[in-house]
Image (cartoon, rainbow, N blue to C red):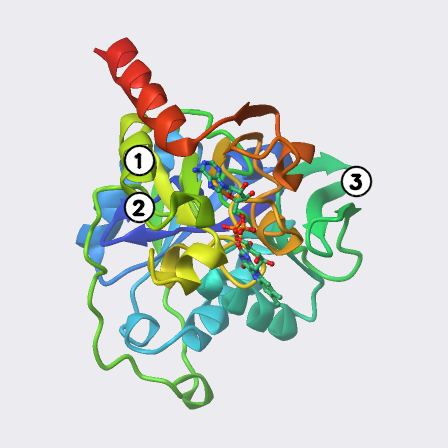
């Protein structure tokens, strides 16, 4: 069976859910081989149980200091060297800003085709066939790389992680980083202040608020917390200074694809849809029955969000206890 490389997304060895999703997808295509870039043996050992739980057959550990001291380019160079040795049938990387830049640089180095923002990847037609939502979500495209090693960035929540216990061996792999790749040194790195909520682009559930909140995100946050969800916002809410820009969903904000997206007080402008319409289930709360958001929802509630959301929060909390 062919090897499929998966670049591990982690923080100090704590493996992110996106990696479990990539490993699950990799198993459809071949034998998942995880590539772990970290600062040393402790991190990779910490990550090993999670990587084994989702079916990594082997973990290639890269710990050259340049990989974490400089931005992106050394990681692409290192992955190219790993790919030259392993000759994988595909390379899967998370579709975040860093992942997409690594993937693009890697595609140039390997002279390979690149597909970004896949919302699904299946084994078909003798290779990896992806599904993407393009042109502000107006078209769904299936695509396949036809040249070189398929490099695919996969959006969070594209697959439900499925466990497959393995006991991967760790192989230390030494790479050579060129001076040309050491062009942007990281001078400081600070973790973002934790909100206690899941990361917006990775969350399984998102509750977003728009202009209809009138600036009060209290009901949005309370409902999100009852569901263990992340909070999002429309641009109108962000531009009004009601919620930070980092939480904007849409064409000029984050693209999300959760299992459940709740849009409250959001009209459903095309630019907002572009960032959320690949969500698996969409629910809207809007007091205007003619609001365009109702055209794409699975469930719609016509009503005032300040009444509907607290009632829903109370009900969720009651059922959980
Ligand atoms: C180039 C460009 C890029 C853009 N990028 C983005 C983007 O990334 N993301 C984005 O979101 N927008 C983006 N926009 C803006 C977009 O066009 C809309 O203006 C914006 O999405 C509207 O936000 P909204 O739905 O919150 O507000 P509105 O369109 O004003 O809708 C508010 C809704 O709330 C409802 N409402 C009011 N009060 C209540 C209540 N009490 N209870 C329930 N419902 C209520 C109303 O019926 C209405 O439907 C972009 C625009 C441009 C031109």
Q: Give the residue drawn at x 37%, y 60%.
A: 246
Figure quadrant of the N terminus: top right
Circle 3 is placed at which residue position?
Answer: 126
Q: Residues within 10 Å of mark 1 (few under 14, many from 20)?
A: many
How crowded is the residue under tag 2: few (<14 C-alpha within 10 Å), some, or many (20+)? some
Q: Gap in Å between the C-alphas at discs 1 and 3?
A: 49 Å
| Residues marked 2 and 1 touching at CB (< 8 Å) | yes
The residue indicated by pointer 1 is 219
Q: What is the quadrant of residue 65 in the picture?
A: bottom left
Nearer mark to the viewer, of 2 and 3: 2
Q: Residues within 10 Å of mark 3 (few under 14, many from 20)?
A: few
Measured as percent of width and height from the top left, residue 5 is found at 52, 50
Residue at horizontal 63 percent and vertical 68 percent from the top: 107
Instruction: Give residue 216's mark.
Output: 2
* Residue 152, x across and y down, in percent: 62, 53
* Image coordinates for residue 103, horizontal then vertical, percent: 56, 64
């Amino acid at each position: 069976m062919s090897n499929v490389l998966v670049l591990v997304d982690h923080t100090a060895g704590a493996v992110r859910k996106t990696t479990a999703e990539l490993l699950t997808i990799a198993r459809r295509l071949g034998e998942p081989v995880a590539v772990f870039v970290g600062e040393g043996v402790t991190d990779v050992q910490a990550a090993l149980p999670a990587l084994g739980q989702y079916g990594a057959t082997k973990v290639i550990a890269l710990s050259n200091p340049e990989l974490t001291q400089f931005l992106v380019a050394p990681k692409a160079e290192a992955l190219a060297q790993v790919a030259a040795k392993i000759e994988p049938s595909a390379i899967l990387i998370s579709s975040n800003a860093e992942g997409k830049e690594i993937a693009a640089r890697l595609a140039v180095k390997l002279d390979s085709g690149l597909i970004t923002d896949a919302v699904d990847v299946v084994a078909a037609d003798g290779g990896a066939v992806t599904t993407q939502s393009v042109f502000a979500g107006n078209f769904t495209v299936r695509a396949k790389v036809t040249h070189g090693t398929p490099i695919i960035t996969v959006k969070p929540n594209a697959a439900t992680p499925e466990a497959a216990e393995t006991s991967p061996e760790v192989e230390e792999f030494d790479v050579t980083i060129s001076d040309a790749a050491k062009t942007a040194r990281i001078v400081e790195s600070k973790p973002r202040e934790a909100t206690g909520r899941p990361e917006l682009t990775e969350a399984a559930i998102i509750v977003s608020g728009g202009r209809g909140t009138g600036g009060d995100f209290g009901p949005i946050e309370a409902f999100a917390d009852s569901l263990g969800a992340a909070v999002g916002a429309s641009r109108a809410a962000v531009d009004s200074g009601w919620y930070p820009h980092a939480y904007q969903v849409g064409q000029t904000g984050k693209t999300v694809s959760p299992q459940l997206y709740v849009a409250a007080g959001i009209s459903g402008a095309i630019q907002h849809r572009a960032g959320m319409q690949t969500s698996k289930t969409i629910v809207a709360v809007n007091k205007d029955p003619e609001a365009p958001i109702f055209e794409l929802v699975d469930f719609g509630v016509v009503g005032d969000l300040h009444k509907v959301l607290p009632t829903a929060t109370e009900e969720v909390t009651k059922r959980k206890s």
